[in-house]
Amino acid sequence: MPYCKNCGKKVPMFKKCGCAAPEKTENNGAKRVLVLIIFLIFFIFGLILGINISGSGTKRTVRNYVKAASSKKGGKTFYSMTLPDEAIKALKDNKKYDDKVDAYNEMIEDMIDDLEGKASAPKFDKIISEKKLTKSQLRNTEAYFERISLKYGAEDADIKVTKGREVKFRTKHKDEDGDYKYEKVTVCVVSVKGEGWKIAPMSAESLG
């Protein structure tokens, strides 16, 4: 007659012991190790993914900003990134938004058409440095966007900036001889509640 592997009692053939002890098998230890390994893999992967996601917002926003600023059809994107939504709404209500976008696109088109030789429009090159904005600098950014909103006719704009960074980055372009030239630019990249990422095209110090 076999014995229960859990409590040691004799158990009839082909029967299970009625003890309350958890069943022990040779595979239980291996299964627990496997579950732990899988958990650690997903934990580490999630941590890495979280870091990548949190760090990608700044670079992606700056890249899109530079692209819009150098594109013949980048007006809507440019203004959506640099104007608060209340300002855009006010411009649309006053039927001025489309004219503003068209004027911007024409300006960039003229700039590109005037390039000579092998010269090219600026492109994003790389992030040089990032510095987290302080609470007072975040409030200054809110005030900056509220002033813009008022300028374009939105009198009661209530802007809430939840986080942001002062970003120094570099652009590159070719001169007429085809040689690369570089330029350093400083902006503030901020997350506006309900609106997403916005660009204040100046340093944090200039916001105050």
Image (cartoon, rainbow, N blue to C red):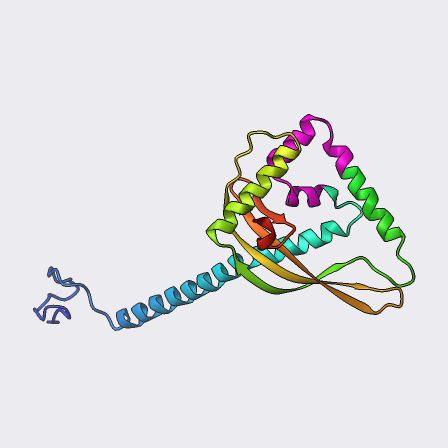
Of the pair 27 and 87, the residue shown nearer to us:
87
Please give left or right for residue 77 compared with residue 73 in the image: left
Q: Quadrant of the N terminus?
A: bottom left
Q: Nearer the viewer, residue 118 or 169?
A: 169
Left or right: 192 with respect to 108?
left
- Residue 105 percent coordinates (x, y): 80, 43
Name the residue at 61% across, 36% down: 85
Considering only vertical position in the picture, is 14 above or below 161?
Answer: below
Magenta stretch: includes residue 88 = yes
Give the percent coordinates (x, y) of residue 2: 13, 71
Q: Is residue 164 above or below residue 47?
A: above
- The picture quadrant where one finds residue 104 is top right
- Residue positioned 59% across, 29% down in the render: 155
Q: Position of residue 27 (x, y in %)?
A: 28, 71
Give the residue displayed 34% in from the left and 67% down from the top. 36
The relative height of residue 51 versus residue 195 in the rendered view (above or below) is below
- Where is residue 57? Give x, y as percent: 57, 55
In the rendered structure, the answer to whether residue 67 lies left or right of residue 30 reads right
User: Which residue is at the far left?
Assistant: 9
Q: Nearer the viewer, residue 156 or 74?
A: 156
Query: Is residue 64 rendered magenta in the image?
Result: no
> Hey, which quadrant is residue 26 in on the image?
bottom left
Which SS does the magenta portion mostly show? helix
The vertical placement of 84 against 134, above or below, is: above
| Boundaries of the magenta span | 76-100
User: Can residue 162 be seen by looking at this rendering?
Assistant: no
Near-viewer residue (38 or 178): 178
